Amino acid sequence: MSAPVAARTLTSTFRSMASDIELRVVDPRPGADAAIERAAARVEAVARHLTRFDAGSALSRANASPAAWHEVPVELAAAVDEAARAHQETGGLFDPRVLDALLTWGYDRTFAQVAGASLAVDPGGSQDPAALPGVPDGRGATARPVPPAPWQPTVLPGADGRGLLNLGGTPIDLGGIGKGLAARWAAAELEGAGASVLVDAGGDEWLGGPGPDGDGWLVGVENPFGEDGTDEEPILVLALTDLGVATSSVRRRRWRTGEAAVHHLVDPRTGLPGGSGLAQVTVVHPDPAWAEVWSKTLFLTGPDEVAAQAEARGLAAAWVTGDGVTRTSSAMDTAVIWRAR
Amino acid sequence: MTDRTRHGRRLAALAVVPLSAGVLGTGVAWAGSHDPLAAATPEPTTPAPSPTATSDPRVDQLLSEVEQARQRIAQLQATLDARAAAAADAAAQAQAAAAAKAAAAAKAPAAAPKRTTTAAKPAPAPAPKPQTTTKSSG
């Protein structure tokens, strides 16, 4: 699985969670290979237990009876616990119960299958969901707001290191935090494996140590209006050390449902695609799971609120408006070493 | 008029001529320069007045004051010359220092001089090659 890419680097790449995963160790120390295997296993465990596209997964079983108690793997118990904390910290904007809206709009299979199905009825005949014009605003889509009461699942310690879980009566989607948690746990396995380590969980990343050149990992921020398969220039380049980073955008996961164009970032208050007027938000945070939580939450605040929310919370954030303008919070400015003009 | 009277008047006239010439300050030379008969003779050089040129106390005092004024002027001129020389030395030293600084700056291009005027915008720098990319995570 792992192979030396350069004299000083050990890298492992594989597919998981419908994404490309990369684990990289710079100046590996003895035991680095084993650390990479453990890190990969943590990613695979997240993919296996938190997916809702496998009817046999722990999450799918819990979603099937959301008011019942379930003995679940520690990964799922920890994920729900952390998601509940995020729900509270974000004032309810982070809410895994948006699953109902996603299912209503047809996102009940892997995204590749959703995209294929929606394109079959796309009058434009495009073969690429990213080719949908502009930023989908969900106009005409069926609204499915979450229940008004705050989400309060219950997680208790179980036997043999497993957990006991009760979802509180509503099925959930953990897509808003799963990759961030995978990055967090893989990073923990790689700690000390080399002078620097990188975990890339499909765009959610952990940048440990000073990087290959010793002056921070150089992280490009993807252009939300770019095209896959092209050697496109980033909109920003960041220099990061011992930090996580996550990006939420509507570049890929958008599709048609009937006549409406929708995306996967659902505003729980309205039950419709949120963040109208924004195309992308990137957040840098010491914890990659919280980088993902805040990138999605800031996205849902929309273009009029995102700056104030980022500054008020001291978040290092960059966002791109629907007309292509890139802005950064003051906390992010210190990390930016290059900007597209 | 008797011969005795005529002789007395002549003596009186001869006595007045040198006296008036001396009072006017140039002695007999003044009289000579105004003597139509002396026009063909070369013009005598005018002697510089000196305290010893006359025994008149008032003239002596004036000549003394003139001499003091000359000395004072000479002193002032010397002072001005000294100041001008000092200023010239300072300017030369400043010029040498500026030349040395410019030479040092030329040897150290990183220490670019401060720009006091708005320069044209440089061409946008290309993006440094990222070692990884954060992208939409779904």
Image: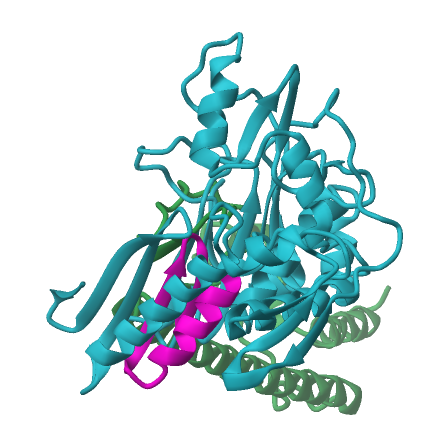
Residue A2 is at least partly visible in this image: yes
Q: Residue at x 77, y 38 (%)?
A: A271
Depicted A83 relative to depicted A135: above or below: below
Asked if the stretch drawn in magenta spans residue B86, the answer is: no
Q: Could you tell me residue A189's position as x and y percent? A: 37, 79
Depicted A154 relative to depicted B76: above or below: above
Picture quarter containing residue A311?
bottom right
Q: Residue at x 59, y 76 (%)?
A: A163
Q: Say which of A77 and A300 sits in front.
A: A77
Q: Could you tell me residue A220's position as x and y percent? A: 41, 52
Farthest residue in the left direction? Answer: A7
Q: Say which of A55 and B108 sits in front.
A: A55
Q: Is residue A90 left or right of residue A223?
A: right
Q: Residue at x 42, y 52 (%)?
A: A17
Q: Say which of A92 and A230 sits in front.
A: A92
Quarter holding the N terminus of chain B is bottom right
Q: Is residue A93 left or right of residue A108?
A: right
Q: Could you tell me residue A190's position as x and y percent? A: 34, 78
Depicted A106 relative to depicted A120: above or below: below
* Chain B shade: green
Q: Residue at x 31, y 60 (%)?
A: A22
Asked if the stretch drawn in magenta spans residue A200, the answer is: yes
Q: Which chain is cyan?
A: A
Q: Is residue B105 left or right of residue A319?
A: left
Q: Could you tell me residue B100's position as x and y percent? A: 32, 75
Q: Which residues are magenta?
A: A180-207
